[in-house]
Image (cartoon, helix red, strand yellow):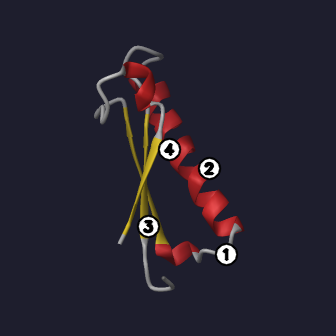
Amino acid sequence: YPKAKVTITGYADKQTGNAKINARLGEERAAVVADALKARGIAADRIITDAKGDTEQPFQVNEDNRVSVCIAE
């Protein structure tokens, strides 16, 4: 799918660290995934990164929020 774009959002769990640390963790998680995709030949202009840190919790189990979620369109 050469025209597909991917959005990568990094998250962190609320029970570890503080808001500043968790914002950085979310950014780093998204960046690591973006770098891995670029290393596999995906053009940088097809990758969008975002970070929610601990401001949003996509999963009920706290530890499961230490994640990057990728959505390709």
Alpha-carbon neighbours of circle 4 within 10 Å: few (<14), some, or many (≥20)?
Answer: many
Q: Position of residue 11 (x, y in %)?
A: 42, 37
Residue 32: image tag: 2
N-terminal of the two: label 1 or label 4? 4
- Quadrant of the snapshot with the C terminus: bottom left
22 above or below 11?
above
Q: Residue at x 51, y 36 (%)?
A: 24
Does dot 3 land on a helix, a strand or a loop?
A: strand
Mark 4 or 3: the one toward you: 3
Does dot 4 land on a helix, a strand or a loop?
A: helix
Residue 6: image tag: 3
67 above or below 20?
below
N-terminal of the two: label 2 or label 3? 3
11 above or below 45?
above
N-terminal of the two: label 2 or label 4? 4
Distance between the Cα atoms at labels 4 and 3? 16 Å
Identified by mark 3, the residue type is Val
In the figure, is residue 42 to the left or right of 27?
Answer: right
Q: Which residue is mark 4?
A: 27
Identified by mark 4, the residue type is Glu
Distance between the Cα atoms at labels 2 and 3? 14 Å
Distance between the Cα atoms at labels 2 and 4? 9 Å
Mark 2 or 4: the one toward you: 2
Q: Position of residue 31 (x, y in %)?
A: 57, 51
Q: Which residue is mark 1?
A: 41
Distance between the Cα atoms at labels 1 and 4? 21 Å
Distance between the Cα atoms at labels 3 and 1? 13 Å
Alpha-carbon neighbours of circle 1 within 10 Å: few (<14), some, or many (≥20)?
Answer: few
Identified by mark 2, the residue type is Val
Q: Please state which of residues 61 and 36 is positioned toward the viewer in this rendering.
A: 61
Place residue 8 in its image quadrant: bottom left
